[in-house]
Amino acid sequence: MAKTMESASPASQKPRVAKNQPTAEEIALRAYQIYLERGAAPGNELEDWIQAERELLGENGKLAVENGKSRRKATVKSAAA
């Protein structure tokens, strides 16, 4: 009997994430970039991971990641009267 096309098993499907949620792979890549930026000194893996998450999530609405490098979005500051 011929096999019919069935949906892929749950184990082979990529987990669905919200649009604005970075994947673990994206966080790991950014954390590695941060590690290299600080001179590849070991011992701050957790801090690098948390910083990467914050940058990728755009915490405080001020960070955006483009082409693997984080950039601050331009903000307009008005003069206080």
Image: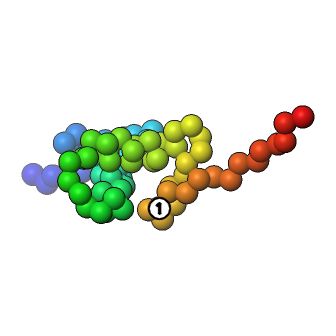
Residue 24 in the image: state x and y as whole percent: 31, 46
State the residue in front, 45 or 38: 38
Displayed quadrant of residue 21: top left
Q: In this figure, which colouring scheme has been used for the structure?
A: rainbow
Tally of marks: 1
Q: Position of residue 18 (x, y in %)?
A: 45, 39
User: Which quadrant of the view contains residue 41?
Assistant: bottom left
Q: Residue furthest top?
A: 81
In the picture, measured across the screen, residue 42 lies left or right of residue 56, that is: left
Residue 60 in view (yes/no): yes
Please indicate whether residue 50 sits to the left or right of residue 40 in the image. Answer: right
Badge 1 marks a residue whose secondary structure is: strand
Q: Which residue is mark 1?
A: 69
In the picture as drawn, the residue positioned furthest to the right comes out as 81
Query: Image point 50% across, 57% down: which residue?
Result: 70
Taking the spot 33% from the left edge, 59% from the top edge, the residue there is: 38
| Quadrant (top left, top right, bottom left, bottom right) of the C terminus | top right
| Residue drawn at the location 76% of the way across and 47% of the way down | 76
Q: Position of residue 12 (x, y in %)?
A: 21, 47
Viewer-proximal residue among 41 and 66: 41
Of the pair 21 and 53, the residue shown nearer to us: 53
Q: Foreground: 38 or 4?
A: 38
For residue 67, above or below residue 19: below
Q: Is residue 33 visible?
A: no
* Image side of residue 78 versus residue 1, left or right: right
Q: Amino acid at mark 1?
A: Lys
For mark 1, does the 10 Å Cα neighbourhood hold few (<14), some (14 to 19), or many (20 or more) residues? Answer: few
Outermost left residue: 1
* Residue at the (59%, 40%) spot, across then down: 61
